Amino acid sequence: MQDISFETFLFAFMLTLLAGLSTSIGALLAFFSKSKNYTILSMGMGFSAGVMIYVSFMEILVKSKESFTEFYSSEILGDSFMVLSFFAGIALTALIDKAIPEDVNPHETKSSSELLELKPHSKSSIIKNSTLKRTGIFTALAIAIHNFPEGFATFISALENPTLGITIAFAIAIHNIPEGMAVSLPIYHATGDKKSAFWYATLSGLAEPVGALVGFFLLFPFMGGATLGITFGLVAGIMVYISFDELLPAARVYGNAHTTIAGITIGMLVMAISLISFKLI
């Protein structure tokens, strides 16, 4: 990776920060939204999946292969290490998922009816307040753990390609919104305290910029062709796993097959146009 200017570093960090803070938007929507129509959320999550799937296969894996090929002066080794890094990213995210209890795992999609049952003062809620608050706090911790690699993925992408970084940050932000809801709803229901619920959701999102900085400063001294290849491969694997394990199932739950595929298609189209536009600049 070429020398990084302070402006480029700051831009990538701010993108990652804004993506993480979208959990706050989820908290606000949970407090004030009375609508039971999840169509927009379904399309939004499909859009996010479309962006991340398209860019992973069309751009990020290509960069991984190029970095490995240049480092080893071998196309076969470039392909081989790209594939290994990609599946290592999937395995890493799967291990993180496995280590987190299912009932507080943000990647275990809730149905729309379950979300509605968590609304404050819902007559259908029979869970004790102390249990609800514990669920919200542990969900915040689980989301924070998940957000570490997501923040690093956004940050590295923005350093390499600002247009790519903006699009990925937008996709990550969309998928963080329901995670903010998952944190804030049970805490708000248990305590009636909007401020407390809002700050728990916000803090869970701040793990993204923290993950970006930790990952960057740990890896930057070793940044060369092989390290870049591994990084891009891992990032692609992480984003593909998130798309198929969380975003697409959630898009189907909150909408239907048509809203999901519409969101995916629009997301891929926007990403394709963004990549072409960047190359024309």
Image (cartoon, rainbow, N blue to C red):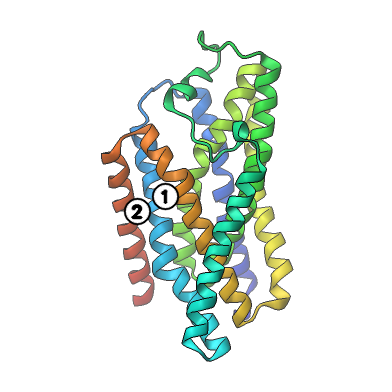
**Image quadrant where residue 269 sits:** bottom left
Give the distance between the C-alpha atoms of the residues marked 2 and 1, in whole angstroms: 6 Å
Binning the other alpha carbons within 10 Å of mark 1 as few (below 14), some (14 to 19) or many (20 upward) gives many
Q: Is residue 159 visible?
A: no
Q: Residue furthest bottom?
A: 73
Residue 133, placed above or below residue 93: above
- The answer to whether the residue labelled 2 contacts the one labelled 1, judged by CB atoms less than 8 Å apart, is yes
Tell me what residue is drawn at x 49 percent, y 67 percent. Answer: 162
Tell me what residue is drawn at x 37 percent, y 49 percent. Answer: 47
Where's residue 137, x and y in %?
A: 69, 31
Quadrant housing the C terminus:
bottom left
Residue 125, placed above or below residue 178: above
* Left or right placement of residue 167 versus residue 4 in this view: left
Binning the other alpha carbons within 10 Å of mark 2 as few (below 14), some (14 to 19) or many (20 upward) gives many
Mark 2 vs 1, N-terminal side: 1
Where's residue 221, x and y in %?
A: 73, 76
Quadrant housing the N terminus:
bottom right
Residue denoted by label 2: 267
Three-letter code, disc 2:
Gly
Q: Is residue 141 visible?
A: yes
* Left or right placement of residue 135 versus residue 62 in this view: right
Q: Nearer the viewer, residue 203 or 147?
A: 147
Element type at marker 2?
A: helix
Where's residue 94, x and y in %?
A: 58, 51
Three-letter code, disc 1:
Ser
Residue denoted by label 1: 48
Element type at marker 1?
A: helix
Q: Nearer the viewer, residue 212 or 75?
A: 75
Tell me what residue is drawn at x 30 percent, y 35 percent. Answer: 256
Where's residue 142, x and y in %?
A: 65, 40
